[in-house]
Image: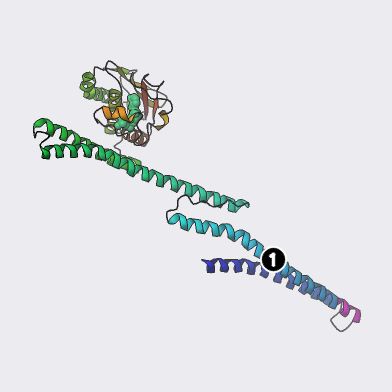
Amino acid sequence: MGRLWRQLRWRIVAAQMVVVVVGVALVLLMAYVILGLFAPPGVLAELDAFRRSVFTAVSVAAFGAIIAGLMTSFWLAREILRPLRQITASSQRLAHGHYTERVPVPASDELAQMAENFNQMAAALEQVEQQRVALIGNVSHELRTPLAGLNGYLEGLMDGVFPGNEETFALMDHEVRRLRRLVDDLQALSRVEAGQITLQLADFDLIPLVERVLRQLGPSAESQELQMEADFAVPSLSVRADADRVAQVLLNLVGNAIRYTPEGGRIVVEVKAAERTAVVSVSDTGVGIPAEALPYVFERFYRVDTSRTRRSGGSGGSGIGLTISRHLVWAMGGDLTAVSPGPDQGSTFNFTLPLASRPK
Ligand code: ADP
């Protein structure tokens, strides 16, 4: 590295020197030409003396210019090279995994911009690294719960604590399903986050799709004594989207509404048309979401109340569903948002979809 910087420094100094030497040569040449116009050397003694003093003066000035040029070029080289050197050293440390690495921002505008860009890049890398570490922690934590359950049942079976009957196997099956769902969700999450989902976009009527999802989740709502209603502002509403993905989003939202609404509550699914979009709202009278948690509900693995989710018997509850849903809605050109007046005051999840170009 040292050799490279030395080379660069000498190049800067050499470039400055070339300018000074060419300048001095030009001045001498001009003095020679101008004085030569009056008389060639050796003809007029006064002119010869004048010529000599001009050359002496120009030589002294040239010497001074070279010294000043050398000093300024060394100073300039140092000023330019120091921040570049720092950035090079820091980028090497960054490449070796020191993500907290930052460089001081120099006073000069262009280099300050470069240093700021470097620091922004380092900060982004640090954030990605933190997310990666958190993701591994979250995934292993989520996998540990059903695995610990399975392990417990197996040990109980081997020790004869649990009878090898249908009930025990059903409990084990429940844990296996939970593991499977989690692995499927993780795979779906990685695909949507990487933008690797292929959408089958088509124009279709949203109303029958919403009715189908409500019929599908009806028994689950009934078993929890929840009242589930549809409120359609229009008899049909044609959207351009992927019907399977829309159903997946709706299943997640209505499924959450069922999970987070205590017995006797009410769930309403509304469909209406706005300017150029269809708006679907899923409202419930459930546990609600505190204002400080609202910005995070779409983050992967985020759960407002982990103990409540655990109590719900592990039906989902890994905090990935809303992340996947939001990415799906985004991919279809819409948006998914959440509102809640606060804890125990219910929540509403709204998502939009583009209307079909030609209403059917
Ligand atoms: P989970 O599988 O844990 O439900 P989601 O990503 O679907 O994961 O939801 C993330 C978190 O958002 C949930 O753990 C819950 O705390 C909160 N949440 C989602 N839907 C509702 C709702 N309808 N009412 C209250 N809280 C909700």
> Badge 1 is on which residue?
71
- Foreground pick, 27 / 147: 147
Residue 272 in the image, given as x and y percentages of width and height: 36, 21
**Could you tell me how many numbered marks the image carries?**
1
Residue 148 in the image, given as x and y percentages of width and height: 22, 38
Q: Is residue 194 above or below residue 173?
A: below
**Residue 358 visible in the picture:** no
- Foreground pick, 110 / 346: 346
**Residue 294 visible in the picture:** yes
Q: What residue lies at 46% left-to-right and 46% top-to-bottom?
A: 124
Asked if the stretch drawn in magenta spans residue 243, the answer is no
Quarter of the picture for ligand 1?
top left
* Rendered-image quadrant of the C terminus: top left
User: Along the horizontal axis of the image, is 184 left or right of 1?
Assistant: left
SS type, badge 1: helix
Residue 251 in the image, given as x and y percentages of width and height: 27, 28
Q: What residue lies at 16% left-to-right and 32% top-to-bottom?
A: 171
Question: What segment carries the magenta color?
Answer: 43-51
Q: Is residue 64 above or below residue 144?
A: below
Residue 22 in the image, given as x and y percentages of width and height: 70, 71
Q: Is residue 279 above or below residue 116?
A: above
Q: How is the image coloured?
A: rainbow
Give the image quarter of residue 214.
Answer: top left
Tell me which amino acid carries mark 1: Met
Q: Dot 1: within a 10 Å radius of its alpha carbon, few (fewer than 14), some, or many (20 or more) residues?
A: few
Give the image quarter of residue 83.
Answer: bottom right
Q: What residue lies at 43% left-to-right and 44% top-to-bottom?
A: 127
User: Along the horizontal axis of the image, is 63 left or right of 180?
Assistant: right
